[in-house]
Image (cartoon, grey):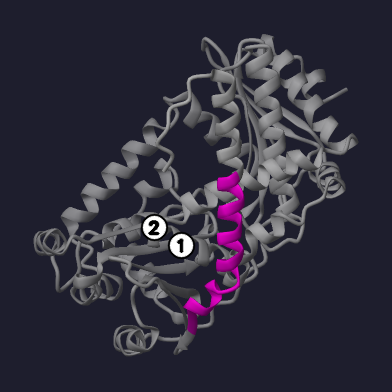
């Protein structure tokens, strides 16, 4: 703690910069020390085909337990899209042993939370509990997983909530842009089946369909259990065997998802009377198991800073221009802007992509990105739930949970030449989605003709 007051503004700025530099190198040293030892706190084992990953965090007051179901939207069809999301949300409302009123009372008494949801690559049923109440919370959590009540009143209420959300998603321009993006970019791809489903598919689901689907989900070969907290892996083995050891192994096989087609650039415009135009341009990106992933994350982060500087700071064309990259099995990145002058904004952003592809970035720019990743990494890994999600993401789509421990080490290896290479390889043939005024869009600029 620095308990002195600096009056001179210039000297104050210089000191602040020095303190940030010292903090960066201190945190960097701490991470390097941790990176070599973190794996020692992770144990993996198998219970009748169920892979279990346990990370011990000594003195942590909470425990996070998560059952991940492999496959995501690759498991569903156009007719039942959204079934896993609905199923897990309804299941979280109560089990055969713990009806909804009893469950709410127990969760309140133990300070625990149980919830579920679905994403493009996997679904999850999660428990967050205090360490002292983990025994009781585990009993409740496993009964919900194994024996969900699927009570009529719970099913009706949750289904109505989901339908209300689906019916209103086109009302907000930001949300509607993402709906349009999914339809355009994921056309003829398994990702076209939204994990939330549609009004039509969710409306067609009933309790009997949920019960039948649940039976198929509960096969150990298609499940992953991740637990993080001050728990002992050896003690957990007996609990997990008792809870899930009788489940059938099944014959789940990982399906290799095709990459999304970015062979040609496109522009899709949806007219809407708005004060500004909402624009997103998607491009291909390597997934977390690909060696190019780390360089692409650095390249996208540099692009993010540059488009903000050029579009927002220097020209004030948009409040929040952005560049981002997802973490999907069939991965994508994007540029995004809301602007009245769509052509100038997109032209500038595409020029910044060209710069990344043609000019070597400074080493200092890469170091700055590494420092930013370091900060966000530690902030993002503060909770047990976040650490469980990170382990699961890399285990399911990133080549193994061990890779989650190497992220910052890999980022620090990135060179200017590698940034230029991945920018040229992936940031091309963008698929643009525009919501707003068609007259504001010169497609030749978007298509770089």
Residue 377, position as x, y percentages in the image:
54, 52
Residue furthest right as drawn? 358
Left or right: 84 as drawn, with respect to 327? left
What residue is shown at x 43% (from left), y 25% (from top)?
A: 172
For the question of whether residue 362 can be seen, the reply is yes
Residue 27, position as x, y percentages in the image:
56, 54
What element does badge 2 sit on? loop
What residue is shown at x 63% (from left), y 12% (from top)?
A: 316
Q: Is residue 206 above or below residue 192?
A: below
**Which range of residues does the magenta coloring cover?**
22-44
3D distance between C-alphas at marks 2 and 1: 6 Å
Residue under label 1 = 387
Q: Residues within 10 Å of mark 2 (few under 14, many from 20)?
A: some
Residue under label 2 = 383
- Is 149 covered by the magenta stretch? no
Question: What is the chief secondary structure element of the magenta stretch?
Answer: helix
User: Quarter of the image holding residue 71?
Assistant: bottom right
Left or right: 29 as drawn, with respect to 105? right
Which numbered marker is on residue 355?
none
């Amino acid at each position: 703690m620095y308990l002195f007051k600096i009056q001179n503004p210039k000297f104050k700025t210089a000191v602040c910069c020095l303190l940030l530099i010292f903090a960066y190198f201190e945190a960097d040293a701490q991470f390097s020390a941790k990176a070599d030892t973190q794996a020692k706190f992770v144990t993996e084992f198998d219970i009748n085909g169920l892979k279990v990953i346990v990370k011990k965090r000594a003195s942590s007051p909470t425990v996070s337990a998560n059952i991940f179901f492999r496959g995501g939207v690759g498991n569903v069809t156009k007719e039942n899209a959204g079934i896993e999301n609905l199923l897990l949300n309804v299941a979280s409302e109560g089990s055969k042993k713990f009806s909804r009123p009893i469950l709410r009372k127990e969760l309140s008494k133990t300070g625990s939370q149980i919830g579920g949801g679905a994403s493009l690559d996997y679904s999850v049923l999660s428990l967050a509990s205090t360490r002292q109440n983990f025994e009781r919370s585990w009993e409740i959590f496993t009964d919900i997983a194994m024996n969900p009540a699927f009570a009529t009143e719970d099913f009706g209420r949750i289904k109505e909530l989901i339908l209300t959300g689906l019916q209103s998603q086109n009302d907000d321009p930001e949300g509607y842009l993402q709906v349009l993006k999914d339809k355009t970019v994921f056309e003829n791809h398994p990702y076209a089946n939204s994990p939330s489903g549609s009004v039509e598919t969710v409306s067609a689901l009933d309790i009997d369909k949920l019960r039948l689907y649940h039976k198929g989900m509960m096969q150990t070969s298609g499940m992953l259990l991740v637990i993080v907290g001050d728990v002992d892996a050896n003690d957990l083995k007996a609990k997990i065997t008792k809870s899930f050891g009788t489940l059938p192994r099944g014959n789940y096989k990982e399906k290799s998802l095709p990459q999304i087609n970015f062979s040609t650039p496109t522009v899709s415009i949806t007219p809407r009377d708005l004060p500004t135009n909402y624009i997103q341009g998607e491009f291909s990106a390597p997934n977390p198991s690909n060696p190019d992933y780390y360089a692409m994350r650095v390249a996208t982060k540099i692009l993010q800073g540059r488009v903000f500087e050029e579009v927002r700071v220097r020209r004030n064309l948009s409040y929040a221009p952005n560049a981002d990259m997802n973490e999907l099995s069939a991965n994508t990145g994007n540029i995004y802007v809301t602007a009245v002058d769509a052509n100038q904004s997109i032209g500038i952003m595409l020029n910044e992509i060209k710069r990344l592809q043609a000019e070597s970035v400074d080493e200092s720019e890469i170091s700055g990105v590494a420092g930013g990743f370091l900060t966000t990494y530690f902030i993002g890994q503060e909770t047990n739930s976040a650490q469980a999600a990170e382990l699961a993401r890399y285990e399911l789509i990133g080549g193994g949970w061990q890779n989650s421990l190497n992220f910052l080490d890999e980022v620090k290896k990135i060179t200017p030449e590698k940034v230029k290479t991945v920018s040229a390889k992936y940031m091309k043939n963008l698929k643009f989605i525009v919501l707003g005024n068609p007259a504001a869009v010169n497609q030749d600029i978007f298509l770089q003709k």
